[in-house]
Amino acid sequence: MADLRIDSRMKVKTFKANFKKAFGASLRVYTTATCKAKADDEATLGSLMTTGAKGGEQTFGGNLRVGNFEKKVTEMFGIGVQVANADDTKLAKDDITLVAAGKE
């Protein structure tokens, strides 16, 4: 099972590509925790970070639940992410694992 490592220097497009490669699911990245506006693919996660966000570096495993992953990314960077199925047509349920989301 693959792991995903992210840090504040990573670009949004790299984050999405690495997520897809590691888990097979699609990732939608937004500029706010409420998921209102999509983030620019060329922006770094650190440049999107809101005041009060922790930042830093984190590694995620494929057995992590979708809802917990989304919550942890919001806590780290203050941005919103949503996990979708492999072809990005529907959002994954919060109670399945990241690997299972890629198989939906």
Image (cartoon, rainbow, N blue to C red):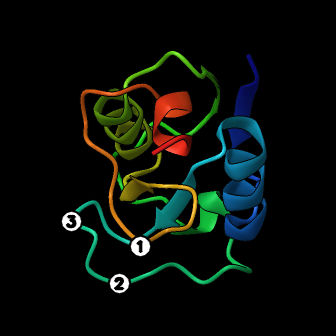
Tell me whether the residue at label 3 lies in contact with that at label 2, contact meaning CB atoms closer than 8 angstroms: no
Secondary structure of the residue carrying tag 3 is: loop
* Residue shown at 41% from the left, 56% from the top: 81
**Residue 29 x %, y %:** 48, 66
Residue 66 bears which disc, if any?
none
Alpha carbon distance from label 3 to label 2: 9 Å
For residue 69, above or below residue 44: above
Alpha carbon distance from label 1 to label 3: 9 Å
Q: Nearer the viewer, residue 79 or 85?
A: 85
* Residue shown at 74% from the left, 80% from the top: 42
Quarter holding residue 79:
bottom left
Q: Is residue 26 visible?
A: yes
Secondary structure of the residue carrying tag 2 is: loop
Tell me whether the residue at label 1 lies in contact with that at label 3, contact meaning CB atoms closer than 8 angstroms: no
Name the residue type under label 3: Thr
Name the residue type under label 2: Ala
The residue tagged 3 is: 34
Secondary structure of the residue carrying tag 1 is: loop
Quarter holding residue 89:
bottom left
Alpha carbon distance from label 2 to label 1: 6 Å
Taking 71 as reference, is 8 left or right?
A: right
Residue 37 bears which disc, if any?
2
Taking 12 as reference, is 70 left or right?
A: left
The residue tagged 1 is: 31
Taking 51 as reference, is 23 left or right?
A: right
